[in-house]
């Protein structure tokens, strides 16, 4: 089993690997339980990251589900169908993709919700230029043309429901496309089974403004009931500059989600 510092270097090489996380008291990723997981990670241009997403889809399995009442396969979210009234503001409903009302369209019944913990979510079609004009050249969407941040913070939390219901659910794997990860220690996902942390997994850094990073983690025996996304080491705000734009912070946003079919928590 590898130390977490060794894992970070391995992620930069990107492939499917199976690991168990040991404790390491010398870094920020200590006191994590030993759990087996399959990791797919990579960074670079859109073609490179699309290839890593294809690898992770194989791990999650087919089909791509678009209706409730499924027991296998996967779900995906690319944000591009979010309507204009929920774009370029913080009005995005936390349960937009977790609806249970029969009258709602199936596209909003994907079993994914943001935690109702006071954090607001911004879906943006301006590359966040409305927050600071310099961001227009900083962030490039992976799938055109919406990107996502947690407004005023770097942290957002995801929960799962059985699609089309209010029943608590879990998934086995989850992946995300990050945009403009410059610092290999700034961006990561922490996974939970209930209150138990399954570990923090770092997204690989990508060289250059606008480059993409993908991180997908699938657990062999554990289930994911919640995850915490940390994107960068500072929140986007007027006057806050990224490392590649002469600033001192690593500003990171995100795009597509891929995750296994949410099933009822047993």
Image: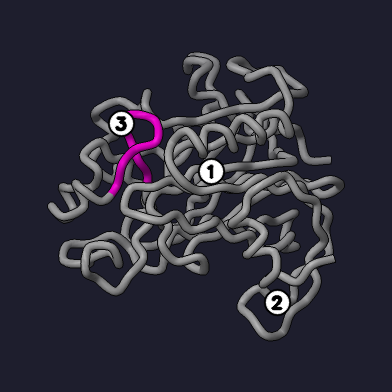
> In the rendered image of this protein, does residue 9 appear above or below residue 107?
below
CA separation in Å, label 1 and label 2: 23 Å
Q: Label 3: which residue? A: 145
Graded by Cα atoms within 10 Å as few (under 14), some (14 to 19) or many (20 or more), the crowding at tag 3 reads some
**Residue 176's mark?**
1
Q: CA distance from mark 2 to mark 3?
A: 37 Å
Q: Which residue is mark 2?
A: 30
Query: Who comes first in sequence, dot 2 or dot 3?
Result: 2
Label 1 to label 3, Cα distance in Å?
Answer: 16 Å
Report which quarter residue 123 is drawn in.
top left
Secondary structure of the residue carrying tag 2 is loop
Mark 1 or mark 2, which has the lower sequence index?
2
Q: Is residue 170 visible?
A: no
Q: Is residue 211 left or right of residue 117?
A: left
Q: Which quarter of the figure has residue 251?
A: bottom left
* Extent of the magenta region: 139-148
């Amino acid at each position: 089993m590898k130390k977490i510092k060794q894992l970070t270097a391995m992620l930069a090489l990107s492939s499917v690997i199976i690991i168990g996380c040991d404790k390491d008291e010398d870094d920020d990723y200590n006191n994590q339980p030993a759990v087996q997981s399959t990791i797919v990670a990579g960074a670079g241009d859109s073609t490179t990251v699309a290839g890593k997403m294809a690898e992770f889809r194989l791990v999650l399995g087919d089909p791509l589900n678009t209706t409730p009442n499924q027991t296998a396969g996967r779900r995906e979210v690319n944000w591009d169908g979010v309507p204009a009234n929920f774009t370029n503001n913080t009005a995005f409903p936390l349960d937009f993709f977790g609806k249970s009302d029969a009258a709602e369209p199936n596209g909003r019944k994907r079993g994914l919700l943001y935690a109702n913990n006071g954090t607001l979510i911004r879906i943006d079609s301006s590359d966040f230029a409305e927050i600071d004009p310099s961001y227009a050249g900083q962030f490039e969407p992976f799938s055109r043309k919406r990107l996502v941040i947690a407004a005023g913070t770097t942290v957002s939390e995801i929960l799962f429901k059985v699609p089309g219901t209010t029943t608590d659910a879990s998934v086995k794997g989850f992946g995300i496309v990050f945009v403009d990860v410059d610092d290999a220690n700034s961006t990561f996902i922490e996974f939970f089974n209930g209150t138990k942390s399954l570990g923090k997994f770092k997204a690989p850094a990508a060289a250059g403004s606008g480059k993409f990073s993908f991180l997908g983690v699938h657990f062999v025996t554990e289930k994911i009931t919640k995850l915490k996304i940390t994107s960068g080491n500072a929140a986007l705000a007027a006057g806050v500059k990224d490392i590649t734009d002469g600033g001192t912070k690593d500003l990171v946003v995100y795009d597509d989600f891929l995750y296994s079919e949410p099933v009822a928590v047993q």
